Image: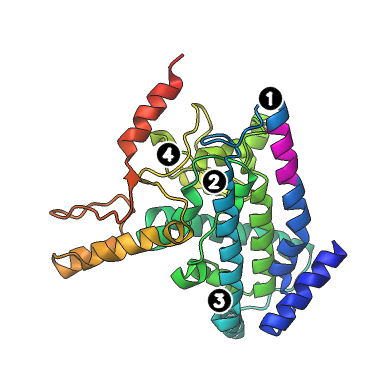
Amino acid sequence: MDFLYQTVTEALINVFGRAPGLSELILILMLPLFVSAFLLEWIHVRYRSGNWNIARNQTFWLREVAANYALGFGYYISSALMNVSYLLALWALLWEHRLFTIPVNVFTVIAAFFVQELCYYWYHRTAHRVRWFWAQHVSHHTGEIMNMSTAARQSILNGIIGTWIFFVPAVLLGFSPDLILGLLAANLAYQWFVHTESIGKFHPAIEWLFNTPSNHRVHHGRNTQYIDKNYGGVVMLFDHLFGTYEPEQEKVLYGTPQQIKSHNWFVLNLHELVDMMRDVMAPGPVLERLKHLWKPPGWVREGHEPIHTWTVERQQTANQETIQALKP
């Protein structure tokens, strides 16, 4: 692990002229654990099922796993570039205009954890309910299988779309950017381990409180009752508070209501952004056209047929699949 840390640190210094921050450090140190957990999950699934192939629709379908890691690699590179180009300077500027200076101790770190969780909840919920942010988040949900590599399925658009804006209140309140971003990195690192079908349900009290594999499988489902549920990162408190919690009951069908049918890296990263901008540019009253930016992803403008540049599978197909999956 020391060798990995030194190698990555030297690479970051050579390329970007700086050492990794706390959030980057957490993810770097977690890399060996991520890889080890993924390999153990693969062995467990293969051994339990006796099925060692990597064919389509299998839990470890090679093409899907490759797409997951390719998206993750692009995400990390784009995040580093966004940090160097403007985000580090932006966080420094915001810190200069903070209302208070909150010291770092055990109690304030616990408080910062819950503040960060609240910020993350509203980012995550908005990323599902506002199409501008969905254009960034959708790539994470286009996977049709679930294993730990799905956690790596992220978008290059994070910094461009402006997901950072949801964590601004925490910094202005007086929590240091390093602390908030470090807790966010720990949040995302934790979520690596909930992207799995190898772990069933825990005790009801644990399921109620924490984001477990079962709760997160629901979040990735395109079953009607699972859509836009379970936004919590580490804990589910805010889902209970704001009425977005849903327990896992029927078999989860993974993907989105309008499922993109591609493993092309550029398509997975950009398809929703391209479709959204084409909808905005399509003829009609200007205000109605602009609503495509802030309305939910499924919103349809009167007199306008939603544009899909690439092939999609619509929600009614998913519902039919649900019926088939539930048949004895």
Q: CA distance from mark 2 to mark 4?
A: 18 Å
User: Residue 148 appears in which quarter of the rendering?
Assistant: top right
Instruction: Name the amino acid type tagged 4.
Output: Arg
Asked whether residue 294 appears in the rendered view, the answer is no
- The 10 Å Cα crowd at callout 3, few under 14, some 14 to 19, many 20 or more, is some
Q: Residue furthest top?
A: 328
Instruction: Indicate which disc, 1 or 3, sits on the residue closer to the N terminus.
Output: 1
- Asked if disc 3 and disc 2 are in contact, CB closer than 8 Å, the reply is no
> Where does the magenta region start and end?
37-45
Q: Which residue is mark 2?
A: 64
Mark 3 and 4 residues: CB-CB less than 8 Å, in contact? no
Q: Nearer the viewer, mark 2 or mark 4?
A: 2
Query: Is 254 left, or right, of 173 in this rendering?
Result: left
User: Which residue, given by chain and number where applicable, does mark 1 sit on?
Assistant: 50
In the picture of the structure, the residue carrying the numbered disc 4 is 222
* Residue 101 x/y as whole percent: 67, 78
